[in-house]
Image (cartoon, helix red, strand yellow):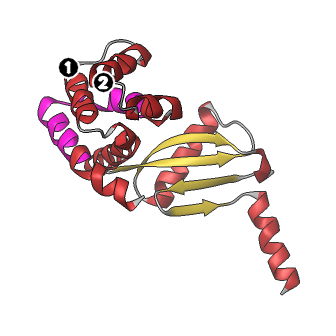
């Protein structure tokens, strides 16, 4: 994985600098293009030596919702020409990290046994922002195995207040 990160870094930094200079907009399309590139069938097609760069670009154009702006088309054509389609998900991840660092925020994944919406999500967001001392971009993932409570992942920090974690702690305490 370190190799992908090393390859992706210059692309992510160049995209970020270009995006800042042009007033933004890359965040609207980079995740969508990265999700397409993460598809195993798309990746196999893109890496097929019998397929030319135009065919790969046309495939992306057909799978994207709406039309890609000119900077997105140029960036995608560059990656396809350099054989770096498989690195797109890592580029998007690093781009988000750079954007978050500039904005003083972070992406947070909330794993919950039950759906969290509306007012409850806003309240949780406020509490977590105080706990992690920064603005958080929350996404909720349902994970019924937690039984109750939440498990929050912000970068390399984890806050686990789930029933499953508490039961595991009790098990360890009882068997020690």
The residue at 32%/32% (across/down) is 27
Question: Alpha-carbon distance for marks 2 and 1?
Answer: 21 Å
Observer-nearest residue: 59 or 152? 59
Look at discs 2 and 1 and give the one toward the viewer.
Answer: 2
Q: Nearer the viewer, residue 118 or 85?
A: 85
* SS at mark 1 in the image: helix
Residue 175 image-quadrant placement? bottom right
For image coordinates 35% across by 36% down, the residue present is 85
Residue under numbered circle 2 = 52
> In the image shown, does 67 or 24 lie closer to the viewer?
67
Residue tagged by mark 1? 70
Q: For the magenta stretch, what is the residue range?
A: 12-34
Q: Say few, some or many: other residues with alpha carbon within 10 Å of mark 1 (under 14 / 14 to 19 / 20 or more).
A: few
Q: Residue furthest bottom?
A: 176
Q: Does residue 35 appear in the picture of this structure?
A: no
Element type at mark 2 = loop
Q: Is residue 3 a member of the stretch shown in magenta?
A: no
Using residue 43 as the reference point, say whether residue 160 is left or right of it. Answer: right
- Image mark for residue 114: none
Decide if residue 76 is in sight here.
yes
- In the rendered image, residue 58, in percent from the top left (x then y), is placed at 34, 16
Q: From this viewpoint, which residue is outermost toward the front?
A: 50
**Figure check: 14 above or below 30:** below
Horizontal and vertical percent position of residue 46: 39, 30
Magenta region, main secondary structure: helix
Which quadrant, please, contains the C terminus?
bottom right
Q: Nearer the viewer, residue 118 or 112?
A: 112
Residue positioned 23% across, 27% down in the render: 77
Q: Position of residue 93 (x, y in %)?
A: 38, 46
Q: Quadrant of the N terminus?
A: bottom left
Q: Height in image: 155 above or below 68?
A: below
Q: How many marks?
A: 2
């Amino acid at each position: 994985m370190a190799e992908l990160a090393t390859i992706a870094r210059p692309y992510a930094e160049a995209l970020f600098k270009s995006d800042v200079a042009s007033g933004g907009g890359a965040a609207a399309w980079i995740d969508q293009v990265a999700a397409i590139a993460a598809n195993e069938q798309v990746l196999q097609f893109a890496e097929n030596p019998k397929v030319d760069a135009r065919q790969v670009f046309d495939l992306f154009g057909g799978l994207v919702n709406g039309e890609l702006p000119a900077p997105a088309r140029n960036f995608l054509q560059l990656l396809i020409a350099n054989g770096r389609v498989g690195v797109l998900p890592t580029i998007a991840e690093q781009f988000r990290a750079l954007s978050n660092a500039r904005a003083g925020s972070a992406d947070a994944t909330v794993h919950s046994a039950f759906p969290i919406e509306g007012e409850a999500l806003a309240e949780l967001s406020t509490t977590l922002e105080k706990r992690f001392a920064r603005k958080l971009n929350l996404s909720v993932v349902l994970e019924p195995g937690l039984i109750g409570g939440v498990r929050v992942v912000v970068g390399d920090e984890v806050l686990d207040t789930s029933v499953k974690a508490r039961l595991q702690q009790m098990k360890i305490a009882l068997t020690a």
